[in-house]
Image (cartoon, helix red, strand yellow):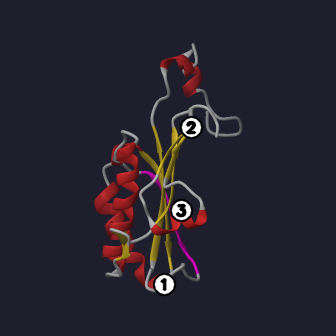
Amino acid sequence: MSSGVRRVSSGGPWEEAVGYSRAVELPNGLVLVAGCTSVVNGSIDAGTPYEQTMNAFQVAVDALKKLGLGREHVVRTRMYLTHARDVDDVGRAHKELFDDVRPAASMLIVSGFIDPSLVVEVEVEAYRTPAASAVPADPDALAAPVEGGPA
């Protein structure tokens, strides 16, 4: 395992079986949270699409908390749904949780999940400023336009 990389587990039933971490924090400040579903206390909580979304994001936020981060650190979310009819319910849950944060977000329709009672899975990426020694000496370099992007 790479030096400076931190990993956390939620104890979810598939983490051990499949061999993955719930969240991984990289030395550059990026935190990646694996796909989260509506698994509460080791059991699937197959509520409405809205409830499943809220539960799944709570699993992700709990993983962030183990690394000392919160919702305010979230910079990207992905929502995977099995039915387009659930877009409004899933979107409503996302808005309630992240309206003040406004991460980049994607919502995709997929064919299914490990358990057919699951209709939503979410992924979260968060960021925190790395240690001061990793910040460039010229802070204006952080604001430089991206090549090919707007000036």
27 on left or right of 97 = right
- What amino acid is at disc 1? His
Q: Which mark is residue 16?
A: 3
Q: Residue at x 54, y 17 (%)?
A: 133
Is 109 colored magenta in this rendering?
yes
The residue closer to the viewer here, 62 or 54, is 62
The residue closer to the viewer here, 68 or 1, is 1
Q: Position of residue 90 (x, y in %)?
A: 38, 72
Task: Give the main secondary structure, helix, strand or loop, of the magenta stretch.
Answer: strand
> Is disc 1 placed on a helix, strand or loop?
loop
> Is disc 3 placed on a helix, strand or loop?
helix
The residue closer to the viewer here, 88 or 133, is 133
Bounds of the magenta segment = 103-110
Give the Cα distance between marks 3 and 2. 19 Å
Q: Position of residue 17 (x, y in %)?
A: 56, 67
Give the Cα distance between marks 3 and 1. 29 Å
The residue closer to the viewer here, 141 or 12, is 12
Which residue is label 2 attached to?
5
Q: Which mark is residue 83?
A: 1
Labels 3 and 1 touching (C-beta < 8 A) = no
Q: Residue furthest front?
A: 16
- Going from N to C along the chain, the mark reached first, 3 or 2, is 2
Residue count near mark 2 (Cα–Cα under 10 Å), binned few <14, some 14–19, many ≥20: few
